[in-house]
Image: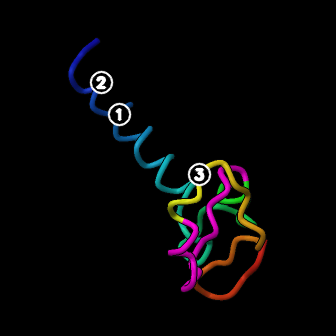
Amino acid sequence: MRPELRDFFSILLQNTKEGYFADPMYGGNYQLKAWTFIGFPGARGAYTEWVTRHNQTYPLPAVSISGERA
């Protein structure tokens, strides 16, 4: 593959990932669907005690910086 095409597709993939997992206030992650899919709680201030709890479902829905909830 030519370098220009290789670079284009790697940048396109990176930008797609960033938009998919970004906070909705930046125009990506519509209705927090990506965060809900991977189990990410979003912009919660009291999440630190759950970081070491592996294989446990976080009980609260994801929340964005602007307060939107999944």
In the image, taking residue 63 as reference, residue 69 lies left or right, namely right
Q: In the structure shown, which secondary structural element does the residue marked by tag 3 occupy?
A: loop
Residue 6, position in %: x, y? 30, 24
Percent position (x, y) of residue 27? Answer: 59, 69
The secondary structure making up most of the magenta span is: loop
Name the residue: 59% across, 81% down.
44
Snapshot quadrant of residue 3: top left
Q: Residues within 10 Å of mark 2 (few under 14, many from 20)?
A: few
- Disc 1 crowd rating (10 Å Cα; few below 14, some 14-19, many 20+) is few
Q: Nearer the viewer, residue 17 or 41?
A: 41
N-term-proximal mark, 2 vs 3:
2
Q: Secondary structure beneath disc 2?
A: helix
Q: Nearer the viewer, residue 21 or 63?
A: 63
Give amino acid for label 1.
Ser
- Front disc: 2 or 3: 3
Locate residue 9, reporting x and y percent. 38, 31
Nearest to N terminus: mark 3 or mark 1 = 1
Is 39 magenta? The answer is yes
State the residue position of label 3.
54
- The amino acid beneath tag 3 is His
How far across and down, in percent of the image, does residue 70 sit? 78, 71
Query: Badge 1 is on which residue?
Result: 10
Three-letter code for the amino acid on which mark 2 is drawn: Arg
Q: Residue at x 24, y 15 (%)?
A: 2
Q: Residue at x 62, y 71 (%)?
A: 24
Q: How many marks?
A: 3
Q: Which residue is mark 2?
A: 6
Q: Which residues are magenta?
A: 37-50
